[in-house]
Amino acid sequence: MDLQLSGKTAVVTGGSKGIGLDVVRLLLAEGVRVVAASRHNTPELKETGAVHVAADLATVEGVETLVSHALAELGGIDILINNVGIGDTEEVVKGAVHDLLTLPEEAWRHTFDLHFYSALRVTRAMLPSLLDRRGVVVNVSSSGARIVTAGPAHYNVAKAALNALTKVVSEQFAPRGVRALTVSPGPVLTGVWTDPDGVVARIGRENGVGHEEFSAQLMGTLGAATERISTPDEVARLIVFAASPNNISGSEIFVDGGIIKNV
């Protein structure tokens, strides 16, 4: 299927692994010129041929580095995929093992810098180019934004703020040609779930439960209708479709196996 993306340009944050890496691969396969940003490059990203920008997007300086390099490399931006997330496992785990009384303010600040302010800052900086090219912003959120009882609290709240940002960008700029969408995955087979020292394994240990047993318990609690975890490629294909020419804006699209059941 030709998604009519050939010749366009894209910036993908968090593009060195997981969902972001698969997004980079799919965009390149569609003929898109891609700049991928992350703190560190990976052999897998190098193999794609995408241009890598090393930047910590939880900081203002990191965003400035990305924007200047991306515009210099691409000339202008048609597609912005705000995908960066998780970051330091220890910081994410804090939100799952502490409540509001004990979760430090610094943990909230770090989580919002990475999961909300990075997207806000990059979007604001890229908007002039996106407006000029009538581009699109795809924010990668999480079904956790709608399930306050599951997962790290500060992460879920930051993702809920990201969902609201999508609506604001759509309302203010879709009339001027810039669409904005949210793609919200549920559990995905990335290192967050699979690594023996990843987020899920660490939270399990904090609760005195082994990795595999805790993963199964968590999936049972979440209640995916398909009874399985999504793959990064499944999520990436939805993101790339969302970025292709269409008339969808302001919407949140789930790829969670049926976890979110409200109408």
Image (tube, rainbow, N blue to C red):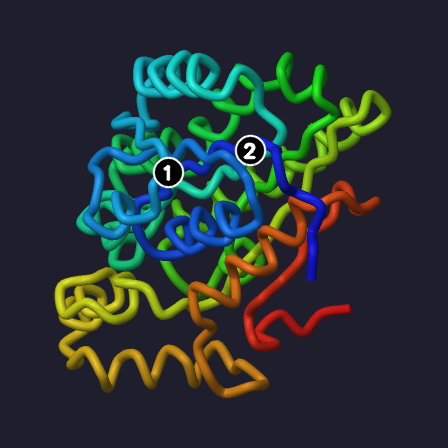
Q: Secondary structure at mark 2?
A: strand
What residue type is disc 2 on? Leu
Where is residue 6? Give x, y as percent. 63, 41
Vertical relation: 251 (above or below) 69: below
What residue type is disc 1 on? Ala
**What residue do we see at 34% from left, 84% from top?**
217
Q: Which residue is mark 1?
A: 50
Q: Which dot marks residue 80?
A: 2
Image check: 238 left or right of 98? right
In this orientation, which residue lies closer to the viewer: 211 or 124?
Answer: 124
Crowding at dot 1, Cα within 10 Å, few <14 / some 14-19 / many 20+, comes out as: many
Q: Quadrant of the C terminus?
A: bottom right
Q: Earlier in the sequence, mark 1 or mark 2?
A: 1
Q: How many marks?
A: 2
Where is residue 17? Give x, y as percent. 31, 52
Q: Quadrant of residue 80?
A: top right
Q: Nearer the viewer, mark 1 or mark 2?
A: 1
Vertical relation: 241 (above or below) 7: below
Q: Quadrant of residue 113?
A: top left
Q: Quadrant of the N terminus?
A: bottom right
**What residue do we see at 58% from left, 58% from top?**
146
Image check: 191 left or right of 14? left
